[in-house]
Every structure is written in C-alpha cells, then in structure tokens.
Image: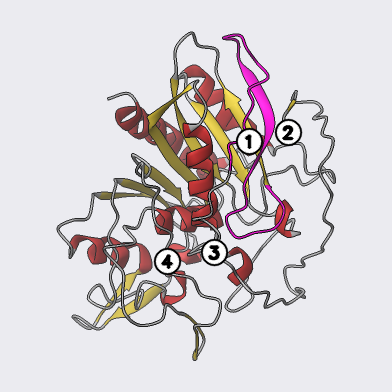
Amino acid sequence: MIRKIGWKKILLAGAAKLVVSVLIIACTKTTATVTDNSNVTTAPIFKDTNATNTESTQIVYLPNPTGGAQLKAVLYIPSSSVPVPAVVVLHGSSGLWSSTDSTNTKMSLQFKGWIDSFRVHKIAALFVDSYTARGVKTFHNMTPPYNFPIAAEFVRPRDAYAGLEFLRANNKIIPGKIALLGFSHGATTVLSTMVDAAAVAKNTAWSEISGSTTYTNNVLAPASKPAAGGFVAAVSYYPGAAMFSYYGKPGTPSDGKYVNYAPIMMHAAGTDPLYTTTYTNTDNNTQISAYDALILKSKLNPASAAISKFEYADAAHSFDGEKLAGADATASVLARTRTIAFLKYYLFN
C-alpha cells in the first residue's frame, strides 16, 4: 500500500482517481450525509518499506474515519538510529498538492519546505490529504451546509486522529511525542481537534450557523481523542476561529464552551479578514476578534491548556505559502522559528 517517492516524481499505483471540480465562486453544492466511522476498528495498514535508518519519504494510506476511499498521505521520516517524534500536518483550502500537478502526487513547495525544517531537527511528519479521497481538489469559502462533508470543525479532526493513530503504529516514531500543525482550513481543524470532547459535551444538538440559518442535520459532535491520548501540542497558522458558531458565539466568551486539552500556538496575519473582523462581545458590549474571544473562552475553564497568539503586522493570509517577499516573507521566517521552538519543547521534553 506504500510506494517510495522522490521530489521530482511520485510513482503511485493502485489508487483510484476521483475527479470532481469545485469552483471558488460557482461551487458544486452537495449535502452528502456525513458519517462518523472514527470508532470503527481497522487493522494496521502500514508496512515500512525502508528497513534501514536512512531518510525516507513515502505515500501511504489511512483508514477514512467518515467512510469511503482511504485517505492519501505523505510520510516523512528523517534518518535516525532511534525512534523520533512526529507531527501530523494539515493542509489548507488549496489542498496538499502542487497547483500544477493534476495527479495529486507532488506536494506543494510550502510543504516541501517544512520537510526541510523537520529534517534539521530530526522530526518525522505525516501530511494528511483530506480532499482527494472525497473527490475534492480545493475547498475555498465553503459555508454551511456545503462545508459539512469536509468540515474543519468535525470531519477533518477525525482525519487528524487517524493520522495520529497511524504514526503510533510505526516503530520509528515515539508514540507519546506527536504534535499537530495546520494552515488556514487545516488550522481551523487544529483548533477543533485540540478540544476535549468530553469537557464540551452537551445535551442539545451540535450546530453551525450561516447568516440567519442554524443547521443541525449532518453536524457531528467534536471528535474524541484516542484512548491512548491526543496530541502533545498544536500550532495553528491563520485559522478561521469563528467556526460558524460551532463552539458558541465567536465574540462572546461566556457563550458556549471551548476547552483545549493541550497547548496551542496561533499565528495571526495582521491584514487577514479572518483575524481583523470583529464580533460583539455581549459579555461587556465591546468588539473583539474571534481569535481573542476563543482564547478568553478557553481561559474560562481551568481545565484548558494555554493558548498563545502571535500577530504579524502587514502579513496576509497564507503568509507561510509560496510567496517569499515583503511582510509575508518576514512573517514566514519568524513564525517558522517560533513554531519549531514550540514543537521541540513539547516533542523532546
């Protein structure tokens, strides 16, 4: 089920190609039923084709926690004679693969750059593709109910945990030292993945709000972390922290509940509407960003772990992408430095 790959070409056999066009403005709307299969026991499907201690990069497949085709992923393991810590990496709305690659087998330059960083620090990484198996290449600007089949709030966190369990089955990985990293749509997924599902459980139906409409059909409860435990820490790059009011009103800390079980670092782009948009905090009748409100919502529960936030003035959304000039480049370098230091603290201590 695994093929070794190089950066110039990835040879992949045996995977069916799903072709569905999703346009940013004129999107194909679907209300497919969302099924939670994350508790279904699946036999390990990992077989390491690299028996040596040399560096390896491979395409692998994970059980799909919501049913259907297996999830494609890229597994990077640095050269090491001993087990290493790891990071599960979640792509943004543009997907995992290069925009010039129609085969969905060549990762974007952004993620190749992260492998370069992980190599230096002897950190393994699993880059999980949440889109290809679900017939999607990009997933921009999707709102309820059309976001539900790949919702960052309740579908992709199950993908993240599938990645976590996959890594734990690999004897080259330290099973208790695995962190989470996400960008944009994947960063929103990070925020929801790190929630203690038991601590935020409620008796009413889970819902999302778009405009004046509240949706409950096909909205799953938050994903529960595996019995062996969740991620040790997480980093979220320019997320959408409002999350369609999934955890309550985005501007009001006392409305709803958000309890993160491990530390989170958030990177905010100073010119990103996802960060600069403010909401009314009805607790004190002030205006507040969804980022700051989420931090305050977390602090209301003493069981929550710490959330740190760094703002990058003049940087735009996706500053960690393939653009390497001006404020975005400055933000990218600084945020990368902070991220690696944060991850190393929790992965090596």
Label 2, label 4: how far apart the Cα atoms are: 44 Å
Left or right of residue 33: residue 170: left
- Say whether marks 2 and 1 touch (CB < 8 Å): yes
What type is the residue that disc 4 sits on? Thr
Q: Which mark is residue 36?
A: 3
Q: Which mark is residue 276?
A: 4
Asked if the stretch drawn in magenta spans residue 234, the answer is no
- Image coords of residue 20 (percent x, y): 82, 62
Name the residue that disc number 2 marks: 1
Left or right of residue 115: residue 7: right
> Which residue is located at x 45 percent, y 69 percent?
243
| Dot placed on the residue nearer the N-terminal end, 2 or 4 | 2
Q: Residues within 10 Å of mark 2 (few under 14, many from 20)?
A: some
What type is the residue that disc 1 sits on? Ile
| Dot placed on the residue nearer the N-terminal end, 3 or 1 | 3
What type is the residue that disc 2 sits on? Met
What type is the residue that disc 3 sits on? Asp
> Quarter-wise, where is residue 55 in the image?
top right
Label 3, label 4: how far apart the Cα atoms are: 34 Å
Asked which secondary structure carries label 1, the reply is loop
Which image quarter is the N terminus in?
Answer: top right
The span picked out in magenta is: 43-70
- Image coords of residue 323 (percent x, y): 63, 42
Name the residue that disc number 1 marks: 45
